[in-house]
Each structure stands twice: as C-alpha cells, then as structure tokens.
Image: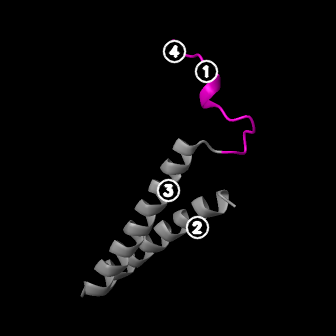
Amino acid sequence: MPGTVNAQNMTADRNLLSEKELLYVKDFLSWELLAMKKCNEAASMCADAQIQQLLRENGKKHQQHYEMLLSHLQ
C-alpha cells in the first residue's frame, strides 16, 4: 500500500544504514570519484585556460561531494 512503512526495511537506530543503503552510498562515492578524475584528466589535456579552469573547479566540486559523503559515514 502506498504511504505505509515496512518495519522490516527500517533499522532500529535511525543513525544506522541498511545494507542496501550502504551499497547506494558506495555507488555514489564511486561516481563522485570517477567524475573528479575525469574532470582533472580533461583539464590536463585542455589547451584553453578558461575551460581548463572550469574543469578543475568542477573536479573540486566532485571532490567536495565525495568528502561530504565520506564524512557522513564516520
């Protein structure tokens, strides 16, 4: 039924994540790390200084997201 909560899917402590949730977070971390690496790689191959700077800034944003996700797990 829509709107009902399945008690089996909820953890006893709201600070704990289920196994499935941890897998999602692991995927998110992997995606952010990959995006950061791709931005930095593209920036190193770019000849235009403005585009290179934008790519590096974008890579730093992905790094911040990665670090933020990681900090929530600690």
Q: Which residues are magenta?
A: 1-16
Between circles 1 and 2, the one closer to the viewer is 1
CA distance separating discs 4 and 2 = 35 Å
* Amino acid at pointer 2: Glu
13 drawn magenta: yes
Badge 4 is on which residue?
2
Mark 1 vs 2, N-terminal side: 1
- Rendering quarter of residue 67: bottom right
Q: Label 3, on which residue?
A: 26
Q: Is residue 11 left or right of residue 31?
A: right
Q: Is residue 7 left or right of residue 45?
A: right
* Figure check: 39 above or below 48: above
Residue corresponding to mark 2: 67
Main secondary structure along the magenta-highlighted residues: loop
For marks 3 and 4, give the CA distance: 28 Å
Q: Tag 1: residue type?
A: Val
Return the residue at label 1: 5
**Would you call the spot at circle 1 few (<14 residues within 10 Å), some (14-19), or many (20 or more)?**
few
Task: Say which of 53 and 37 sits in front.
Answer: 37
Work out whether mark 1 precedes mark 3 in sequence or the reverse, and give the earlier one. 1
Crowding near the residue tagged with mark 2, few <14, some 14–19, many ≥20 C-alpha atoms within 10 Å? some
